[in-house]
Image (spheres, rainbow, N blue to C red):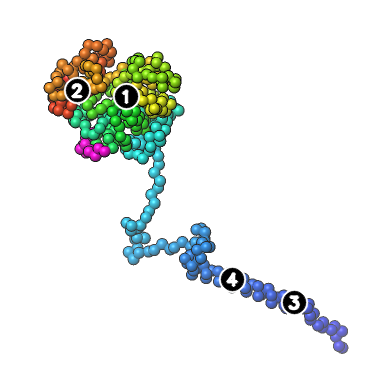
């Protein structure tokens, strides 16, 4: 009997199925080829082939393989000519105390120097102990014939003093390299006797010395000055003093209506020696002061304002008890005239030096203790007195 079941024919695929499958295969093939092409391109093309207008990101560049030397010890050392960047220097606390070289070498104008020097820390207590120093400011024309005497004075007391020298810009000399004065000249400008440009030079010395925060006292001296005491005695007195020493006494000489019209009265007018010894606070006042400096520099037609500017600041700025109205530098004016007495080798005796130190009996001021004195410096000594001064220094001045 024939079977009743009949085999069903295979159903035909829907129309268009073959074209879809072929499209899928084509897309997959193109993606595979693109991936392979990209890998080959990345592996064989160097970054130098890229156009300079489309530089790749650094993170996308393939790093160069580390070269291996034949000995197998690692990559070769860089050649001496290869440039290697050192890490940036870190600024420490001591960098704020004194600039490199003490600030002597700089290209600042006076205006820039005074602005920088007048900065004051607002925090009263320093985070570290700062040893106070005395800054010795030498206002000279050129050579310092008495330099060997000062070298004996400073010997053995490094770290307790600073030296600054303002000489004529035309001066090209230099002390020997082993001298404490070597390399201590600051950028200078021309000066002339009795002119206010000498005050500019004094302020330039103060401003440069103020850059060192360790300088606590400031003494102005000349090439004709000598010390009358040992360094320990002078240092102990200056560091321990509560006042600054600026010669200032009332006078009517050279006061004119020009100053009265600019609110400098006759009662405020003063005169005195230019050779001062002052503390840091007053030194900052001097370099920061501009109002009265402009007046004294003005067109008043009066000579020798040098003798009046600093002494009159004592009253104009109200320094009061902060300033003792006297100097610590002995000068003898034996007769009326523009210049004080000077001393050569024939004049130098133990009696002369001792009398200067005590003020020749006319000074009731003393340091107390073992060393009684009225003045710690004296002027004007000539260069030919050096030998005699060196001979007497151990016995009379206490050093050398």
Q: Is residue 178 found inside the magenta-colored segment of the image?
A: yes
Q: Which quadrant, please, contains the N terminus?
A: bottom right
Q: Which residue is mark 1?
A: 304
Q: Residue 136 appears at what percent x and percent y?
A: 28, 28
Q: Earlier in the sequence, mark 1 or mark 3?
A: 3
How many C-alpha atoms fall within 10 Å of the one at disc 3: few (<14), some, or many (≥20)?
A: few
Compare residues 54 and 374 and report the one nearer the observer: 374
| Disc on the earlier residue, 2 or 4 | 4
Gap between marks 4 and 3 measured at Cα: 26 Å
Judge the density around disc 2: few (<14), some (14-19), many (≥20) Cα neighbours within 10 Å. Answer: some
First in sequence: mark 4 vs mark 1: 4
Task: Judge by depth and name the residue closer to the eye, 174 or 123.
Answer: 174
SS for dot 4: helix
Residue drawn at x 22%, y 16% as measured from the top left: 335
Residue carrying label 3 = 17
Disc marking residue 34: 4
The correct choice, above or below, for 376 with respect to 154 in the image is above
């Amino acid at each position: 009997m024939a079977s009743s079941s009949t085999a069903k024919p295979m159903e035909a695929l829907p129309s268009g199925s073959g074209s879809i499958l072929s499209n899928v295969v084509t897309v997959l093939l193109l993606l595979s080829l693109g991936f392979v092409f990209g890998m080959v391109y990345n592996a064989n093309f160097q970054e130098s082939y890229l156009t300079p207008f489309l530089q790749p990101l650094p993170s996308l560049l393939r790093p160069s393989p580390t070269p291996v030397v034949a000995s197998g010890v690692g990559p070769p050392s860089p050649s001496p000519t290869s440039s290697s960047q050192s890490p940036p220097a870190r600024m420490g606390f001591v960098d704020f105390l004194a600039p490199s070289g003490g600030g002597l070498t700089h290209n600042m104008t006076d205006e820039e120097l005074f602005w920088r020097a007048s900065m004051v820390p607002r925090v009263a207590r320093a985070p570290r102990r700062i040893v106070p120093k005395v800054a010795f400011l030498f206002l000279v024309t050129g050579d310092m014939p008495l330099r060997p005497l000062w070298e004996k004075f400073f010997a053995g007391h490094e770290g307790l003093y600073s030296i600054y020298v303002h000489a004529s810009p035309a001066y090209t000399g230099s002390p020997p390299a082993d001298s404490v004065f070597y390399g201590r000249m600051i950028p200078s400008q021309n000066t002339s006797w009795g002119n206010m440009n000498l005050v500019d030079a004094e302020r330039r010395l103060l401003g440069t010395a103020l850059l060192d925060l360790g300088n606590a006292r400031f003494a102005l001296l000349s090439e004709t000055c000598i010390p009358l005491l040992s360094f320990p005695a002078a240092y102990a007195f200056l560091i321990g003093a509560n006042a600054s020493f600026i010669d200032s006494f009332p006078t009517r000489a050279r006061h004119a209506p020009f100053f009265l019209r600019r609110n400098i009265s006759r009662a405020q007018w003063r005169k005195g020696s230019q050779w001062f010894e002052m503390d840091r606070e007053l030194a900052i006042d001097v370099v920061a002061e501009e109002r009265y400096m402009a007046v004294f520099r003005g067109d008043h037609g009066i000579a020798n304002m040098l003798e009046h500017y600093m002494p009159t600041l004592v009253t104009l700025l109200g320094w009061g008890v902060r300033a003792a109205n006297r100097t610590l530098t002995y000068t003898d004016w034996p007769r009326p005239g523009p210049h004080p007495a000077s001393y050569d080798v024939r004049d130098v005796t133990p009696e002369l030096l001792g009398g200067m130190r005590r003020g020749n009996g006319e000074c009731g001021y003393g340091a107390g203790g073992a060393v009684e004195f009225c003045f710690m410096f004296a002027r004007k000594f000539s260069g030919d007195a050096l030998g005699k001064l060196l001979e007497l220094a151990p016995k009379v001045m206490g050093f050398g």
